[in-house]
Amino acid sequence: MSFAACGDDDATTTADAAAGAVDAPASTALNGCNDADFQTAGTTIAFGGSLNLTYSPKCLLVTAGATVTFNGNFTTHPLSPGTASSTSAGSPGNPISLTNTGTTKTFTFSTAGTYPYICTAHASSGMVGAIKVQ
């Protein structure tokens, strides 16, 4: 075994690892929520007001059949399913619908999966999140 061969193998491994590191978040993270980020924190997501351009919690973990309520001003922070680049991103059948009026909206998550959502006015500023249903 020569060091040159090991160096070439290491370079290939490093390049492959770098490529994998770039690809991995796209396949496992939705709207900045990786598996480790999801938290069980009730079934209410607040936004706007003193929270500024954030959802709290951003990454929510619930069980199948749970009802999740969004509380905030939908006129200034319109809610939409998906990611900034795709309203169909995530698991199919996202129960979140475009909501741009009112201050409270409830959605029932019947099927296991990961359901991303965004504020259509502020997604580029990081106002995004996801609900993981087990």
Image (tube, grey):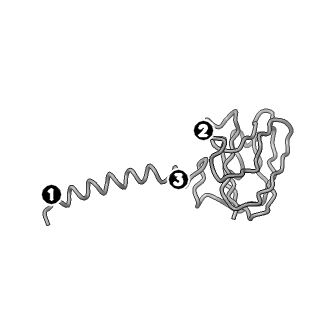
Q: Where is residue 31 in the image (x, y as percent from the top left)?
A: 61, 47
Tag 2 secondary structure: loop
Q: Residue at 60%, 38% (x, y): give it.
A: 85
- Quadrant for the N terminus, please: bottom left
Judged by depth in the image, the label closer to the viewer, 2 or 1, is 2
Tag 1 secondary structure: helix
Q: Where is residue 129 in the image (x, y as percent from the top left)?
A: 66, 48
Q: Marks 1/3: CA distance?
A: 34 Å
Residues at circles 1 and 3 in contact by the CB criterion of under 8 Å: no
Which residue type carries mark 3?
Ser
Q: In which quarter of the image is residue 50?
A: top right
* Left-right relation of 48 to 105: left
Q: Residues within 10 Å of mark 1 (few under 14, many from 20)?
A: few
* Left-right relation of 93 to 27: right
Q: Position of residue 35 (x, y in %)?
A: 59, 60
Q: Marks 3/2: CA distance?
A: 15 Å
Question: Pointer 2: what residue?
Answer: 85
Which of the labelled discs sits on residue 4, or is there none? Answer: 1
Q: Residues within 10 Å of mark 2 (few under 14, many from 20)?
A: few
Question: Pointer 3: what residue?
Answer: 27
Residue nearer the viewer, 116 or 91: 91
Q: Residue at 86%, 38% (x, y): give it.
A: 102
Judged by depth in the image, the label closer to the viewer, 1 or 3, is 3
Which residue type carries mark 2?
Ser
Vertically, is 95 above or below 41? Answer: above
Q: Which of marks 2 and 1 is nearer the N terminus?
A: 1
Which residue type carries mark 1?
Ala
Q: Marks 2/1: CA distance?
A: 44 Å
Vertically, is 3 above or below 105? Answer: below
Which of the labelled discs sits on residue 89, or is there none? Answer: none
